[in-house]
């Protein structure tokens, strides 16, 4: 038995579960900890436990000081990789504890665990005013791969610190900033620096700027920004960000190329791609072509249902989808794309 779910907390659990060494995953979401005493016993159990890998405490109505105590108890945990504290009441104390947790997490450390996923989304009231501490910690942390901050209010004055962290961090692959009240200037700064992010593959920015007028400059510059980025594979934006179909296809082209492995070519020597990497590269290209055939095949069906001509459908496929030869050409000339 490696996974366990509870919808309530009792004394036997909080007192004795540290001895259950086989337990790898514990989901206590929507549980009632019934006061500070239960939280204190739970923290004691966390300090003694040596095998837990995944812990979910979503919507447990935990107050800021209670969350902070739990995070402090996890700072020296040897195995934890996935922690979700979403839908609680995190505040300054919790964020301070999280920053200390991240600062202890290094791949070279054998004493502490290597936290890879952290969810702080949807806190109440959601005003995380000292997130600069977390951003600073990210500049030193080299284990966290996924960070969710969705539906919180992030101070606009601290966005530059977040950008600096993304430029330095070489491990963080996914960042969720959906509905974080980031306005035009902050979003422009985040997007304009995409070419400088070393590891970020997935960036979610929906439900921030709502005015189409505010998105015009970002939409026109996105293809050029992504042209210089060989890592990002998913850029999740509101549809109104890129109203122009041609620009949208350019954005999707570079994201598809990155999924196919364009960064491999950037990191190889001038002698070309090593023979041993070709099977992996071609497999990725084939996977991308398959997804494109499905996508544009659906477009063709829609066009047929709208009684459009065959020539229009062919033109749509030619503009939107990339055949095998063009995909390989753009992929193999990935570094050159940045210089054109």
Image (tube, grey):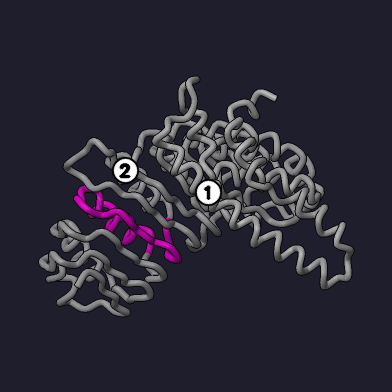
Cβ–Cβ below 8 Å for labels 1 and 2?
A: no
Numbered badge on residue 190: none
* Between 17 and 216, the one nearer to me in the picture: 216
Q: Can you give x and y, in whole percent of width and height, for residue 7 in the image?
A: 32, 79
Q: Can you give x and y, in whole percent of width and height, for residue 133 in the image?
A: 42, 40
Compared with residue 94, is residue 87 higher up or lower down, i.e. above or below? below
Picture quarter with the C terminus: top right
* Left or right side of 150 for 327: right
Q: Can you give x and y, in whole percent of width and height, for residue 245 in the image?
A: 79, 51
The structure residue drawn at horizontal position 16% and vertical position 63%, both measured from the top left corner, is: 45
The structure residue drawn at horizontal position 73% and vertical position 41%, both measured from the top left corner, is: 218
Numbered badge on residue 202: 1
In the rendered image, residue 323 lying in the magenta stretch gets the answer no
The structure residue drawn at horizontal position 47% and vertical position 54%, both measured from the top left corner, is: 148
- Judged from the image, the secondary structure of the residue bearing numbered disc 2 is helix
The furthest residue to the top: 270
> For the magenta stretch, what is the residue range?
63-90
- Of mark 1 and mark 2, the one earlier in the sequence is 2
Q: Could you tell me how many numbered marks the image carries? A: 2
Quick one: label 1, few (<14), some, or many (20+) residues within 10 Å?
Answer: some
Picture quarter with the N terminus: bottom left
**Label 2: which residue?**
100
Q: Quadrant of residue 86?
A: bottom left
- Judged from the image, the secondary structure of the residue bearing numbered disc 1 is strand
* Between 36 and 176, the one nearer to me in the picture: 176
Compared with residue 283, is residue 106 higher up or lower down, i.e. above or below? above
Alpha carbon of mark 1 to alpha carbon of mark 2: how far?
25 Å
* Left or right side of 230 for 17: left
The mark lying in front, picked from 1 and 2, is 1
Quick one: label 2, few (<14), some, or many (20+) residues within 10 Å?
Answer: some
Q: Can you give x and y, in whole percent of width and height, for residue 102 in the image?
A: 33, 43
The structure residue drawn at horizontal position 31% and vertical position 39%, both measured from the top left corner, is: 103
């Amino acid at each position: 038995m490696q996974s366990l779910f509870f919808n309530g907390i009792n004394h036997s659990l909080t007192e004795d579960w540290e001895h259950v060494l086989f337990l790898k995953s514990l989901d206590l979401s929507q549980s009632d900890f019934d006061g500070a005493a239960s939280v204190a016993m739970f923290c004691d159990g966390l300090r003694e436990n040596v095998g837990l890998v995944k812990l979910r405490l979503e919507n447990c109505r935990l107050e800021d000081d209670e969350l902070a105590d739990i995070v402090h108890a996890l700072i020296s945990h040897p195995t934890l990789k996935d922690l979700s504290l979403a839908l609680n009441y995190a505040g300054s104390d919790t964020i301070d504890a999280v920053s200390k947790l991240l600062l202890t997490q290094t791949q070279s450390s054998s004493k502490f665990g290597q936290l890879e996923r952290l969810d702080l989304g949807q806190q109440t009231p959601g005003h995380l005013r000292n997130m600069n501490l977390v951003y600073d910690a990210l500049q030193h942390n080299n284990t966290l791969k996924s960070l969710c901050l969705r539906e919180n209010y992030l101070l606009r004055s601290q966005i530059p610190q977040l950008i600096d962290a993304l430029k330095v961090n070489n491990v963080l692959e996914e960042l969720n900033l959906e509905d974080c009240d980031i306005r035009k200037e902050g979003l422009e700064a985040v997007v304009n620096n995409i070419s400088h992010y070393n590891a970020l593959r997935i960036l979610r920015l929906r439900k921030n700027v709502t005015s189409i007028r505010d998105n015009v400059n970002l939409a026109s510059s996105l293809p050029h920004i992504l042209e210089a980025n060989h890592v990002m594979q998913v850029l999740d934006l509101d549809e109104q960000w890129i109203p122009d179909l041609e620009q949208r296809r350019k954005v999707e082209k570079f994201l598809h190329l990155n999924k196919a492995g364009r960064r491999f070519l950037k990191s190889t020597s001038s002698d070309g791609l090593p023979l041993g990497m070709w099977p992996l590269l071609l497999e990725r290209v084939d996977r991308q072509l398959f997804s494109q055939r499905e996508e544009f095949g659906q477009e063709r069906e829609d066009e047929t249902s709208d009684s459009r001509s065959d020539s229009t459908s062919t033109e749509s496929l030619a503009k939107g989808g990339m055949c095998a030869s063009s995909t390989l050409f753009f992929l193999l000339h990935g570094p050159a794309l940045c210089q054109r």
